[in-house]
Image (cartoon, rainbow, N blue to C red):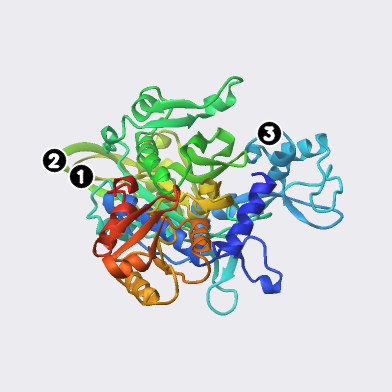
Amino acid sequence: MSEAEGDRIAELAKRRGFFFQTAGVYGGVGGFYTYGPHGASLKDNLEAAWRELFVTREGHMEIDAPTVMPESVFAASGHLETFDDMILECPDCGASHRADHLVEDNTDIEEAESLPPAEIATTIAEHDIACPTCGVALAGEPVEEFNLMFETNIGPGTASPGYLRPETAQGIFVDFPQLSQYARNQLPFGVAQIGRAYRNEISPRKGLVRVREFSQAELEQFFDPETDEPPLTRVADVSLPLYSATQQAAEDGGLQELTVGEAVDRGVIESDWLAFYLGLSLDWYASVGVDMDRFRYRQHRPGELSHYAADCWDAETEIGGDWVEVTGFAYRGSYDLDKHADYSGESFSVFEQYDEPVTVERPTVDPDMSELGPRFGGVATDIADALETRAERDPDAFDGETVTVEVAGDRYTVPVEQTGFAVETVTESGEHVTPHVVEPSFGIGRLVYTALVHAHREDEVDGETRQYLALPPSVAPTTVGVFPLMDRDGLDEYAQRVAGELRATGLSVTYDDAGAIGRRYRRQDEVGTPFCVTVDYDSLEADTVTIRERDTTAQRRVPVDDLGETVLALRDGDCRFDEL
């Protein structure tokens, strides 16, 4: 993002109450922002629009899990070991920088996050990259991994370590056994959540783009990978702007416009479920104010993929020449459920009933604990459980004289004759299935920022430069402003009554009687209010008011009795202003 554009949006955001740095009286702290009155309303409206699509229309359940969880959750999920960014500390001023961002800011390399730390260090030396804070050369300084999670203690003392969640997803995964019961163990089903997440970013920057506390709206779609298919026909003809990993690697690669059906048929998007959610989401972005000429879906290259993802596509928006991720669509497979099952010892599967019972061969183990106990001591029971799991997933491993299993990171070799391994013929009425997961994860703050940047306009009205936000009426912080032409002669009482009646219909209304009417229009234009209603002397005579549309500044006369219904229809897209 260009510095001028960033400064302009930051100034507007602070002056008009969209967002500003928290605790400014104490000097503030990087990566924490307060949403002001207009920003909180815009954020709420975006979340409501997301909930309307992904919960209400798609028929998924929604939960609200805690933001603090015990250490065991994140040990199981892999975040303790792998949730890292690359940090480099300036030897002179001591400032910490995210090393891959230094490379991206000072070279032509994009997505440097996918490079290993050693290569990042080499690139910094080759390009003579200096500390952005003090200008000292950073060549030769070590690039190290830094875990991004905030650690805390649950209860007094340090006996129960915990972490602020770095994503809302783990709250869904860890409670899957309970949630699957609410879904009556019927796949597929989805679980949604909107809430705060926390990442101790090395170098927060670009306003709401990279912060340490942020809101996510995530859906975890659980399905049987063998039998469940998404309703692709609903989105098969939706045209997607795709930037695949193959196109990124090609010298002449670029954006491909393919329908969902074409992308699946050609194997550009391998997962039908990922393709479905890319298609389902496209119109939603436009509805909340994203400029679709500045939008794309970019596939992660192999080195970028998170530890849990088999494939991932990011929805990205262009801001000042930079592409910013606003959503990640990840195919997580059964990674999370398998991990929590292994660590907790509980079942994270769903029992699917067959239409008719079937006879199958089933590998089993019956470990000889009189041998395993003396040999392995306290871990013997865990080894027996691991043998059972290994038999279910890889019965061929028992073909030799010994079999090896892993418990808490350590490997143990057991003679097959002591495992009691056998293959039995059994009649079964169903099977336990560990679902796979596709996850659309939306960054609400980044979408708020995108909406502000993409909606910002300048034009000239009555010989003066005007700034306004062309936000869709459905997400604008305020729907309608109500003004008395003069603050006297009963116009103010009439206007206040109109404002109250509009609020009673559920509309967001602001009342303003200060200053010239043109200045009041400009104030509302600048915060994106799509409609303004003016009460004048004709209103007292004929019970009509003037309604003005923000983008065109066109005005129409409307009976006051029809005003609420009219504004609701305009906000919801059921009526166009030029039809009034």
The 10 Å Cα crowd at callout 3, few under 14, some 14 to 19, many 20 or more, is: few
Task: Give the total of numbered labels.
Answer: 3
Residue 430: mark in rendering: 1
In-image side of 326 versus 138 (left or right): left
Task: Determine whether the residue tagged by mark 1 lies in a helix, strand or loop.
Answer: strand
CA gap between label 2 and label 3 equals: 55 Å
What whole-number distance in Å separates the C-alpha atoms at marks 2 and 1?
A: 8 Å
2 or 3: mark nearer the eye? 3
**Mark number for residue 355?**
2
Residue at horizontal 24%, vertical 52%? 185
Type of amino acid under label 3: Ile
Q: Which mark is residue 109?
A: 3
> Pointers 2 and 1 in contact (CB under 8 A)?
no
Secondary element under disc 2, as helix, strand or loop, is: strand
**Depth-wise, is mark 2 or mark 1 nearer the camera?**
2
Amino acid identity at mark 1:
Gly
Circle 1 residues within 10 Å: few <14, some 14–19, many ≥20: some
The furthest residue to the left = 356
Numbered disc in front, either 3 or 1: 3
Question: Residue 572: x and y, percent?
Answer: 31, 52
Q: Percent x, y for residue 33?
A: 59, 63
